[in-house]
């Protein structure tokens, strides 16, 4: 059996909050229960929003909590050549095209079968010349992507109808999350992607993209519950009351912070204290 490798992949666009701890509990907990490894990836593909200070704070909070990755962090901002190379391979097969559409134009033209914004394919056959100020998209196949989520069971998704042709690089020249993460998961040999339920609907497109890129076998996916601010609103990094920094300053111990986060998604009872080294116990049942 091949070795299990997963990743913890924070975006340095804010402080670590209790929702990130839930993700860390699942990532390290499941990895340890499978004798796997955890790679750390800094998802700073968005150059306008990522800040080095946040990265340092995140790494510092992870160390304080006791979550230790295997190996040094990989930064997406340093991997432009790798993404370019991956894009070249798609381009060589005629799978990409330039797109001049603004977000407002797409919003106006698009109404998909779901509540997601679907790119309607406006530039698909315009044969625009790629260059500054233009985005790049990959042509999706109209296939149904079937996979088994390790928590939710069998899934079937049709990305070409959900989101339309995927943006690979935006008009500002940023690599998109979907593209960078898919390339990185392949290049880093990630066998298991463990992340929040909000990303379940975008799994099919990552599986298709991985296949178009040439990855023989996609990773397995596990999507876990999110802590919600309200039934419709996710926690965000700006919710300071749930920041790890603030809990630290209030005198909480790492084991109390981790136990609190685990209790919020039903992994244990509130008041349980659990160290980072023991989070796999939560998955042993
Ligand atoms: Zn377009």
Image (cartoon, grey):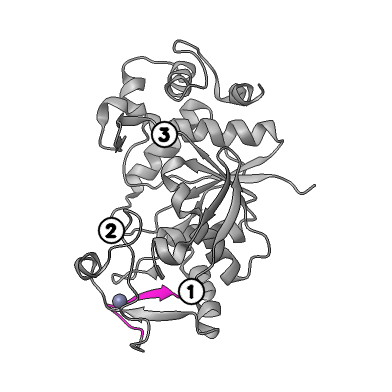
The residue at the point 39 percent across, 47 percent down is 11
Marks 1/2: CA–CA distance = 19 Å
Image coordinates for residue 231, horizontal then vertical, percent:
30, 31
Pair 3/2: label in front: 3
Marks 3/1: CA–CA distance = 33 Å
Marks 3/2: CA–CA distance = 26 Å
SS under mark 1: helix
Residue receiving disc 1: 84
The reply, left or right, for residue 205 in relation to residue 44 is right
Instruction: Judge whether residue 239 is colored magenta.
Output: no
Which image quarter has ligand 1? bottom left
Residue receiving disc 2: 48
SS under mark 2: loop
Is the distance from the Cβ of mark 1 to the nearest ligand 1 atom less than 8 Å? Answer: no
Label 1 crowd (10 A; few <14 / some 14-19 / many >=20): few
Image coordinates for residue 196, horizontal then vertical, percent:
46, 40
């Amino acid at each position: 059996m091949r070795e299990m490798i997963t990743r913890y992949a924070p975006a340095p666009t804010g402080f670590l909050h209790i929702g990130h701890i839930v993700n860390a509990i699942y990532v390290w907990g499941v990895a340890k229960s499978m004798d796997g490894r955890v790679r750390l990836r800094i998802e700073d593909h968005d150059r306008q929003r990522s800040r080095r200070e946040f990265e340092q704070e995140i790494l510092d909070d992870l160390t304080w909590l006791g979550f230790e990755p295997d190996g040094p962090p990989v930064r997406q901002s340093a991997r432009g050549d790798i993404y370019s190379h991956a894009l070249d391979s798609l381009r060589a097969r005629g799978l990409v095209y330039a797109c001049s559409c603004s977000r407002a134009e797409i919003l106006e033209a698009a109404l998909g079968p779901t509540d997601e914004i679907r790119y309607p394919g406006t530039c698909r056959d315009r044969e625009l010349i790629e260059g500054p100020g233009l985005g790049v998209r990959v042509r999706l196949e109209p296939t149904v992507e079937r996979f088994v989520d390790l928590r939710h069971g069998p899934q079937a998704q049709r990305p070409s109808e959900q989101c339309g042709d995927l943006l690979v690089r935006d008009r500002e020249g940023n690599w998109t999350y979907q593209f960078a993460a898919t390339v990185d998961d392949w290049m880093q040999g990630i066998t298991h992607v463990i992340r929040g339920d909000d990303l379940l609907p975008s799994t099919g497109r990552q599986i298709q993209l991985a296949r178009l890129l040439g990855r023989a076998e996609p990773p397995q996916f596990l999507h876990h519950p999110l802590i919600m601010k309200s039934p419709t609103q996710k926690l965000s990094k700006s919710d300071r009351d749930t920041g790890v920094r603030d809990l630290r300053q209030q005198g909480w111990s790492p084991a109390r912070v981790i136990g609190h986060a685990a209790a919020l998604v039903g992994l244990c009872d509130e008041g349980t204290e659990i160290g980072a080294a023991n989070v796999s116990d939560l998955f042993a049942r």
